[in-house]
Image (cartoon, rainbow, N blue to C red):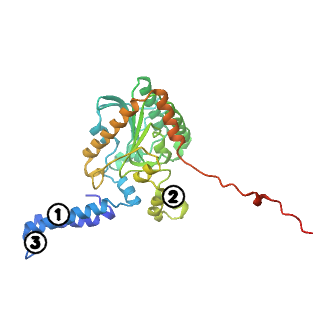
Amino acid sequence: MKHQLDFEKPITELQNKLDELRLHPEKHSLGISFEEEIQIIEKKLEETRRQVFLNLTAWQRVQLARHPKRPYTLDYIKHAFTDFQELHGDRLFAEDRAMVGGFAKIGEHRVMVIGTQKGRDTKENILRNFGSAHPEGYRKALRLMRLAAKFGLPIITLIDTAGAYPGVAAEERHIAEAIAVNLREMTLLEVPVIAAVIGEGGSGGALGIGVADRVLILENAYYSVISPEGCAAILWKDRANAAKAAAALKITAKDLLKFKLIDDVVPEPLGGAHTDAAGTAANLKTHLLKHLEEVLALPVAERLKVRYDKFRAHGHFTEKTESAESHAVPQAAG
């Protein structure tokens, strides 16, 4: 059964009408030829599709980022990379299948590719823990990054997670420490690091593999310190305000590029990445190679400085200095 989002209903209705007309041409309207009616509906369908998808709200893009048919990390590895050899385990506790990674090639470059992986159905989602990694997932990612650095291989990370797993077991095995260590170590890796947000980029779970020389994002992906539902629950005490929260958080690719939190936006086909996985992967591959070659051209010392300065520049605040009068001690009367 096709998954339909609320804002796609006008498109679906027109598509159903077109399919019905083609299946039962005897039902076409009187006074107009069958071919003309088909052309009219096709034109209206294309206009409606463009009107809907070129004017998406932040919340609608979040819905697209979560679309169950959207390509996941292993789909992009299949289409954009070659010679993938998956590696397993963190060598400390366990194998975490919410985090995948291994040696691969992209273009002519041998790389280490790492990413969060969701599942397509209930069984696979349980296996992948819905794309939310435990501490061992982040420790596995770091092990693979250090292995890449040992052999001088660039690192590419693909981010698609609602966040790191927040359960008791993860806390017992120090999820915050695992992510914090990744943040520190990724700033010090001497090999190039390119990150791409391909779906959901949720909180520290995304940032745990997101400290990179260049950070890319797909057009309908999002990157945020908190989910819109979580933000709505905190600020408005009601998760029903998720759409309002999504707009306030400025989490879309356009907003993130404006605030210089990401470096490039990878276009998606009209309708979202799930409508053409191979085409989206080809776009992603082109952008990854472009940025990888630019970063490879930098000397190591310069690369590390630019990476460090890039993340130090994230987040700005101002302090309001109170006037001298506000600190003056009131004088006693008389």
Foreground: disc 1 or disc 3 = 1
Please identify the residue farthest to the front as the structure is shown: 324
Residue 97 in view in this figure: no
Marks 2 and 1, how far apart in space? 40 Å
- Name the residue that disc number 1 marks: 42
Relative to 66, say whether 282 is above or below: above
Residue 267, x across and y down, in percent: 32, 48
According to the picture, the residue beneath numbered tag 2 turns out to be 231
- Residue 192 rendering spot, x and y as whole percentages: 42, 31
Q: Nearer the viewer, residue 150 or 31?
A: 31
Query: Helix, strand, or loop for circle 1?
Result: helix
Amino acid type of disc 1?
Glu
- Cα separation, mark 3 vs mark 2, equals 50 Å
Q: Earlier in the sequence, mark 1 or mark 3?
A: 3
Residue 54 image-quadrant placement: bottom left
Amino acid tagged 2: Cys
Across and down, in percent, residue 223 comes to 44, 49
Q: Is residue 297 above or below residue 169?
A: above
Instruction: Name which residue lies at 29% across and 38% down.
Output: 80
Q: Which residue is mark 3?
A: 28
> Within 10 Å of the Cα at label 1, are there few (<14), some (14-19), or many (20+) other Cα atoms?
some
